[in-house]
Amino acid sequence: MEQRKKRRDLRARKPAVIDRLGLWFSKSRDVDGLWVGTMESEPWPGLARVEDALRLIERHDSLHYSRVIDNLERIWVNLLPSGLASYDRSLKACVFDERYVLLETTTPERIATTIIHEATHARLEGWGIGYDDEKKRARIEAICMRRELNFVTKLPHAEVLREEVARTLEWYAGNHDYFSDASFEQREVQGQVEALRYLGAPDWVHRFTLKLRAVRMWVHRFAGSVGRQT
């Protein structure tokens, strides 16, 4: 019963209005039933890179490719305030930061491993294993990284990437605090400032955003303390 309740809660979240609008205005293509889109400007180089990565997975690992198709509904190149990519539960999407996708050093192999990572998050959430519990996050990430490693071992000439994934998996084991709410919050704030700079926003917008964030945090904590007292 509890497991079914968790699954219902995970499915209940609906996409935000801003995300629905973003999807509407995105350039998109259908890849074997998977919606692949981008918020970039023409000629949409990130979209092509994601498609190349999907074909790479299909060519070298049919099992992982079927899991990507089965567990994700979308792959979206957008601007993330922090992180290179994430799984968006409300969209059932692997969301990429366009800055990461467009880097020359971001090869199709790297994009492919990231897609597999986020598809694994989707698969786990489908089983009721969510990301809300801080104590479980390091273990969940380790599972996703092992799926990456499993895939990379099947790629030709991918020794460097294989070693990188293995080192990251080892690092996760000894750095559980990296996945705490406080750590995520800190990276989110800094990431928002960097995203605004990337978009060319003036400095006063950065300062206003940080102040607004501080006010929201204070209100959230105050409301939480009142709730505990009542």
Image: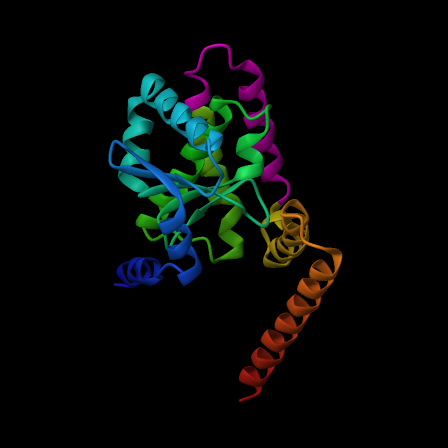
Residue found at x 57% / y 81% = 223
Q: Nearer the viewer, residue 6 or 10?
A: 10
Give coordinates of residue 151: x percent, y percent.
41, 23
213 left or right of 38?
Answer: right
Quarter of the rendering occupied by the N terminus: bottom left
Give coordinates of residue 22: x percent, y percent.
42, 52
Q: Nearer the viewer, residue 141 or 64?
A: 64
Q: Nearer the viewer, residue 105 or 25?
A: 25
Specify whether residue 170 is painted magenta: yes
Picture quadrant where residue 165 is located: top right
Specify whether residue 202 is painted magenta: no
Q: Which SS does the magenta portion mostly show?
A: helix
Residue at the front extreme? 42
Give coordinates of residue 36: x percent, y percent.
36, 37
175 left or right of 25?
Answer: right
Query: In this picture, which residue range is highlighted in magenta?
Result: 151-175
Residue at the top extreme? 157
Residue found at x 59% / y 74% = 220
- In the figure, 202 relative to 221: above or below? above
- In the figure, 44 relative to 224: above or below? above
Give coordinates of residue 209: x percent, y percent.
66, 63
Q: Nearer the viewer, residue 119 or 150?
A: 119
Residue found at x 24% / y 36% = 33
- In the figure, 20 relative to 113: above or below? below
- In the figure, 178 relative to 182: above or below? above
